[in-house]
Amino acid sequence: MERVKVLMSVWNSAGNPYWKEQLESIHAQEGVDVDLLVRDDGSSDSTISVLQQEQEAGRLSWYQGENMGPGRSFLNLLAHAGGAAFYAFSDHDDVWLPEKLRVATEALHDVRGPALYFCQTKLVDAELRPLPQVPIHPRLTYGEALVYQFIGGCTMVMNEALRRVVATYSPRYLRMHDIWIYDIALAIGAKVVFDPTPHILYRQHGHNNVGQSGSRWIQWRDRWRHLRQGEHIRRRTAEELLRGFGPMMTPENRELTERVAHCNRSLSRRLRLVFDCRLTPARPLIGLTGRLAILFNQL
């Protein structure tokens, strides 16, 4: 059986009513050898006591660090991991279906170079009742990834070759670990596999760090609010990709990354980028939002 190291970051999670259920679903994975590594992100409650009990029972290993937030905490886990064929990220409030890791490792089994798998999620409420789904249809192109954020870290599985690449550079700017790793994989030409079949019950409740529920209007409102806040998420991420992985990119990907990273320098640069068909995502309305963001220097 393939060995999969599952990486989980927790913070003040002792009172989380869903944590134990997620742990049970991880250990119930079929057809793989699971090794669970947990990082405590500077908890101030009794989370450490729970982790110690779980470790003594042989169900996980763990370590504690300073509070970094989920994105950097997961990258820290990835840097501390090793010794497995595959690596998966886990939230602490979902439920994994028994075949989740087996399906992912089978999809990547014969890939020699860096490789990444992710799948569709099945949205459920706090009691695991089905919610209206938000299907994704990614084109799996690097240009799409530079303007459209959609991947869920809780569905991701990567091989050791990609883990080693990601661990070579610690970004100064980081929004979330899953988007960052997906961008890296496509930038360097890794094998990326999307599975449209959900293998995870993605629980939506009042305390999610990131969720997918809500009407289309709410999703569009939130997306536009992020653009107007002026964080320049995609441009700053492109700058980091150039610093960390520019030499590993294909010439075309490097040129496109430079265009995005430097689009704030002049209106003429932004106009050229607006009409660059390589940035076209699968969903036309998201493409329109992205082009408006480029034009008004909010990318």
Image (tube, grey):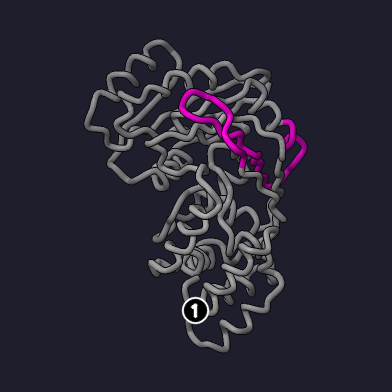
> As drawn, which residue projects farthest toward the left?
44
In the rendered image, residue 279, in percent from the top left (x then y), is placed at: 66, 68
Q: Residue at x 61, y 44 (%)?
A: 134
Does the image show residue 134?
A: yes
Q: Residue at x 48, y 23 (%)?
A: 127
Q: Main secondary structure of the magenta part?
A: loop
In the rendered image, residue 126, in percent from the top left (x then y), is placed at: 46, 27
Q: Residue at x 54, y 17 (%)?
A: 27
Q: Is residue 207 above or below residue 255?
A: above
Q: Nearer the viewer, residue 261 or 247?
A: 261
Check disc 1 and report the residue beneath it.
Answer: 296
Does the image show residue 159?
A: no
For the N terminus, give its image quadrant: top right
In the rendered image, residue 229, in percent from the top left (x then y), is placed at: 38, 66
Q: Quadrant of residue 111?
A: top right
**Span shown in magenta:** 106-133
Q: Quadrant of residue 33?
A: top right
